Amino acid sequence: MMIVCHTVDELRNKIKQVCKAGASIGLVPTMGALHEGHAALIKAAVENNDFVVVTIFVNPTQFGPTEDLDSYPRTLDADLSLAKQLGASLVFAPSAQAMYPSEEMTWVEVTGNLTKVLCGSSRPTHFRGVATIVSKLFNLVKPTRAYFGQKDAQQVQVLKRMVKDLFFDVELVIMPIIREADGLAKSSRNAYLSKEERQAALVLGRSLEKAQEQFKQGERKAKAFIDFVSGEIAKERLAKIDYVAVYQLPDLKQPSAIINGQSLLAVAVYFGQTRLIDNCILEER
Ligand code: AMP
């Protein structure tokens, strides 16, 4: 039997029992409209924890004023049946009021490069919203392990930093990007794409894969990767680039002209109104 909670009190009571029993807890935070990317996280959590909590919450504080909060896909019934089928123990689907009961509130903010570059530059309040909601969920669920996708590469680095700085006693487990058969990274926002936009969006996965191939062949100039991927995307009439960038991992500092160590090649591109992100890691194997 999978439990469904909508209030903080219900969740707290259940977590208290689970902790008392000494069970390990896996947490999978999501905004719902679950797809195979989310499913991979839930499966990994179910395999490695006694009790798995999936949260479904379209977090208002991580959306900018002109972003898609109102139109974000909401498919709770289908999400509940997928979570159940995958073996989740509990789904927490709170209201915005439950998570943010008062207008006066506490923020958790990771400062510096990590939240300034890439998505931080076009979405200046996004990561503050993410860090705040994830902190609230960590405090409520008390997870042993929490599962996040490499699809949101910058989010991963921000949360790793937050966990370290705030001494959260949780292991972050990062799962690889799950893609459609044609290479498009799975995303709840793919549902917004027209047929033509979806076709154009294939350039992201395709050009990142080629870039990785070039890295394997010995290319090391940061600019060469940026020029190549930007050039490929620019060929698509329906694409409008937000950024194509290379940063060092884990701190997202500017790389030197010749990259060494692990680097992130990340893109954000509009197809019509829909902003998609994708990335790959460039590293010696
Ligand atoms: P979201 O519902 O978009 O906030 O995503 C919830 C979690 O699922 C985040 O940790 C995402 O990084 C992860 N996720 C979303 N899409 C994918 C994907 N295609 N592959 C792997 N993880 C994903």
Image (cartoon, rainbow, N blue to C red):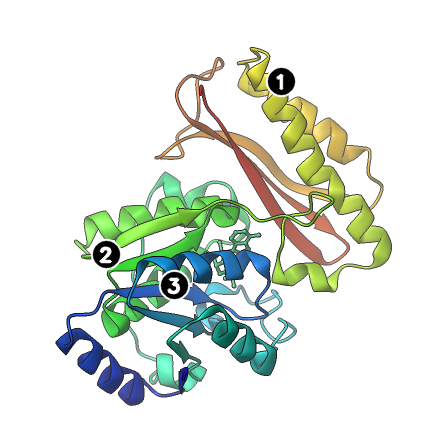
Q: Which residue is mark 2?
A: 170
- Disc 1 + disc 3, Cβ < 8 Å: no
Q: Residue at x 55, y 56 (%)?
A: 37
Disc 2 marks a residue whose amino acid type is: Val
Crowding at dot 3, Cα within 10 Å, few <14 / some 14-19 / many 20+, comes out as many
Which numbered circle lies on residue 46?
A: 3
Q: CA distance from mark 1 to mark 3?
A: 37 Å
Q: Position of residue 225 (x, y in %)?
A: 61, 22
Closer to the chain start, of discs 2 and 3, is 3
Q: CA distance from mark 1 to mark 2?
A: 37 Å
Q: Position of residue 40 (x, y in %)?
A: 50, 56
Q: Residue at x 67, y 26 (%)?
A: 210
> Which of the 4 image quadrants contains residue 104?
bottom left
> Which of the 4 image quadrants contains residue 92?
bottom left
Q: Residue at x 51, y 68 (%)?
A: 31
- Res. 100 in view: no
Disc 1 marks a residue whose amino acid type is: Gln
Quadrant for the C terminus in the image:
top left
Does dot 2 land on a helix, a strand or a loop? loop
- Disc 1 + disc 2, Cβ < 8 Å: no
Q: Position of residue 66 (x, y in %)?
A: 61, 65
Disc 3 marks a residue whose amino acid type is: Val
Which numbered circle lies on residue 214?
A: 1
Quadrant for the N terminus in the image:
bottom left
> Which of the 4 image quadrants contains residue 263?
top left
Query: Left or right: where does residue 235 sit relative to residue 188?
Result: right
Closer to the chain start, of discs 1 and 3, is 3
